Image (cartoon, helix red, strand yellow):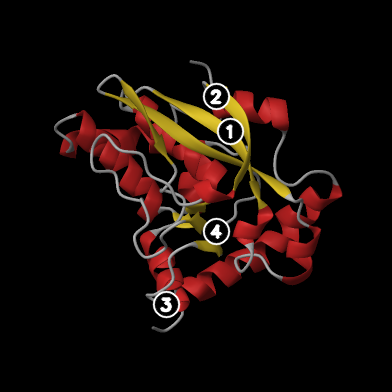
Amino acid sequence: MKSKLLDLNHPDIIKLKDEILELSRDESQIIGACYRYVRDEINFGYNSSDDITASQVLRDGYGQCNTKATLLMSLLTSCGIENRLHGFTIDKKLQYGAVTGFFYAIAPREILHSWVEVKYQGKWYNLEGFILDIDYLTAIQKMAGKDVRSFCGYGVACKDLQNPEVDWKGGNSTYIQKEGIVRDLGLYETPDEFYQKYGTNPKGIKKFFYKYFIRFLMNKNVSDIRNRPA
């Protein structure tokens, strides 16, 4: 598998892979360790672009669906776990709250999205619940209130906000934005292939303003939500 974005030979990826394998005894534990690292050690946030390398996501310490997926694929592949990328578009409504005001207004109606599919005991499982770190998700749950179930916004689109399917238990799929999916864009062996075909979010002049200005305001907003007093 040739992939610039998975960055399999980068020292930081190799070091993290070795740490995961040292503490994991079987395939389920390896998948779980990779998954939990990407979910909780990499905060939810907005990187400079979708098509950055796995090692860059690691250095940033934050990511969204597409960039976190690249890191998860890199770790799984490094650990010998078969996986693939599934591309979609999602309705921008699920980003409302995390993205606000003028920036939300100019965002495209459909946004590129992806999750990772992992092969475990001969079956494929969908992993999407890694997008939001637990601290951020908990803040959203508290903000919405314990009686709220179906929820769309702040990076969430699920049927039960208080009991989302975000934990790998061995042989199960996980989701946090699935209910916002609009179009299925198919399966890809590497993220490189996906972005070569569909480009990145956003495009054109919006990409310039997003990279150098807008995303910093978005990340501050996300951080404020995560650190909001209970």
Percent coordinates x, y for residue 108 in the rendering = 77, 51
Provide the secondary structure element on which disc 3 rests.
Answer: loop
Question: Pointer 1: residues within 10 angstroms few (<14), some, or many (20+)?
Answer: many
Quadrant position of residue 5: top right
- Can you see residue 71? yes
User: Mark 1 touching mark 2, by CB under 8 A?
Assistant: yes
Mark positioned earlier in the residue sequence (1 or 2): 1
Residue ID at (59%, 26%)? 186
| Distance of label 4 from label 2 (alpha carbons) | 23 Å
Q: Residues within 10 Å of mark 4 (few under 14, many from 20)?
A: many
Residue occupying the point 38% across, 83% down: 230
Q: Name the disc covering residue 187, or none.
A: 2
Specify whether 157 is left or right of 51. Answer: left
Left or right: 209, with 10 as reference point? right
Residue 138 screen position, x and y as percent: 38, 68
Q: Which mark is residue 193?
A: none
88 up-or-down from 57: above or below: above
Which residue appears farthest toward the top when viewing the image? 1
Amino acid bearing label 2? Leu
**As displayed, is residue 115 above or below residue 155?**
above
